[in-house]
Image (cartoon, rainbow, N blue to C red):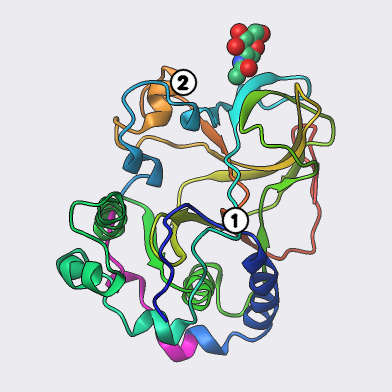
């Protein structure tokens, strides 16, 4: 049963299952209520999952940041879009199964035994990093939660977006097949702003089964769908989140290094890899601003 040995990354087929679950969850608010999930009980930290990477140089994987000023048709920039092989990436576990295991740094030795990883293995290091990141404290105005199953990810989302509101899941999609992960892309027409009075962003974390680091910030965010085209003709419908207020972020957040700015002085936008998710409430009202068409 605990056979998920590879730590490669993440996957896609579960996206289908997820969309099915989103429909179930967001059309009846019962689940979140039953769980009595409480934000105050969710403690953990830090600003952003990217801090986890401990990059010291301009690692290509950091080339996902830009500012609102650069969000415009014709803008050209290098972007890193990781591509993971769904067949070798960690699978989501059913909630019951995931809940039957501890998920804490303190229990790491026991977990390593269960999964059969040596304590000096790269897998052990990855699990340690993920658990540490998940146990770190949220920054001011942020709520975070590491979900060990799709169900618990949706339950968390429901508590943030409101148990009575329907919501939808958005993710970056690759329109063409290629193995190129880092190249220059140009932003195409039809940049669309997604109305998002509230949002939850979930990032996949290295772990033997699918773990999602989900967080939601009270400060103002804007969500966009940005079509981009790579130099090799690759087309991507990329999801972008722009954080307008970065004043509470750690000064060591990699985006500041990449953009050469300080916390609070600039908006920070970033591209989402395909296996990360953005949840927003479903809204009927359509509103256009700043020359972007809205949906
Ligand atoms: C992007 O284009 C610039 C020149 O316009 C080039 O110097 C740079 O190496 C390119 N980046 C990538 C990742 O191909």
Which residue is depicted at the point 54% across and 32% down?
Answer: 64
Determine which residue is flagged by label 2: 259
Which residue is depicted at the point 80% across and 41% down?
Answer: 176
Residue 131 image position (x, y, % from top left): 27, 59
Determine which residue is flagged by label 1: 278
Secondary structure of residue under mark 1: strand
Secondary structure of residue under mark 2: helix
Which residue is depicted at the point 47% across and 74% down?
Answer: 149
Query: Does 209 sit above or below residue 68?
Result: below
Which residue is depicted at the point 47% across and 30% down?
Answer: 62
Instruction: Report whether 43 appears left or right of 230.
Output: left
Residue 253 image position (x, y, % from top left): 35, 33
Which tag, 1 or 2, sits closer to the chain's start? 2
Instruction: Report whether 195 appears left or right of 148.
Output: right
> Residue 264: which disc?
none
- Span colored in magenta: 33-45
């Amino acid at each position: 049963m605990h056979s998920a040995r590879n730590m490669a990354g993440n996957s896609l087929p579960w996206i289908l299952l997820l969309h099915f679950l989103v429909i179930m969850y967001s059309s009846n608010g019962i689940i979140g209520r039953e769980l009595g999930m409480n934000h105050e009980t969710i403690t953990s930290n830090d600003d952003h999952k990217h801090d986890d990477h401990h990059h010291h140089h301009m690692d290509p994987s950091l080339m996902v940041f830009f500012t609102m000023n650069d969000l415009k048709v014709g803008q050209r920039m290098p972007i890193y879009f990781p591509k993971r092989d769904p067949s070798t990436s960690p699978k989501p576990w059913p909630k019951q199964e995931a809940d039957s295991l501890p998920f804490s740094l303190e229990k790491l030795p026991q977990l390593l035994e269960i999964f059969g990883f040596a304590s000096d293995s790269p897998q052990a290091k990855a699990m340690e990093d993920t658990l540490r990141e998940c146990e770190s404290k949220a920054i001011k105005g942020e709520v975070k939660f590491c979900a060990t199953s799709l169900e618990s990810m949706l339950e968390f989302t429901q508590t943030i977006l409101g148990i009575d509101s329907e919501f939808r899941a958005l993710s970056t999609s690759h329109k063409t097949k290629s193995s190129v992960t880092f190249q220059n892309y140009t932003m195409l027409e039809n940049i669309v702003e997604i109305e998002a009075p509230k949002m939850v962003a979930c990032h996949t974390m290295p772990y033997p089964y699918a773990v999602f680091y989900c967080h939601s910030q009270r400060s103002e965010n804007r969500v966009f769908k940005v079509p981009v085209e790579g130099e090799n003709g690759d087309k991507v419908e990329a999801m972008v989140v722009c954080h307008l207020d970065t004043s509470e972020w750690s000064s060591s957040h990699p985006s500041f290094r990449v953009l050469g700015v300080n916390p609070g002085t600039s908006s920070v936008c970033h591209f989402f890899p395909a296996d990360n998710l953005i949840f927003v409430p479903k809204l009927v009202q359509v509103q256009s601003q700043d020359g972007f068409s809205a949906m």
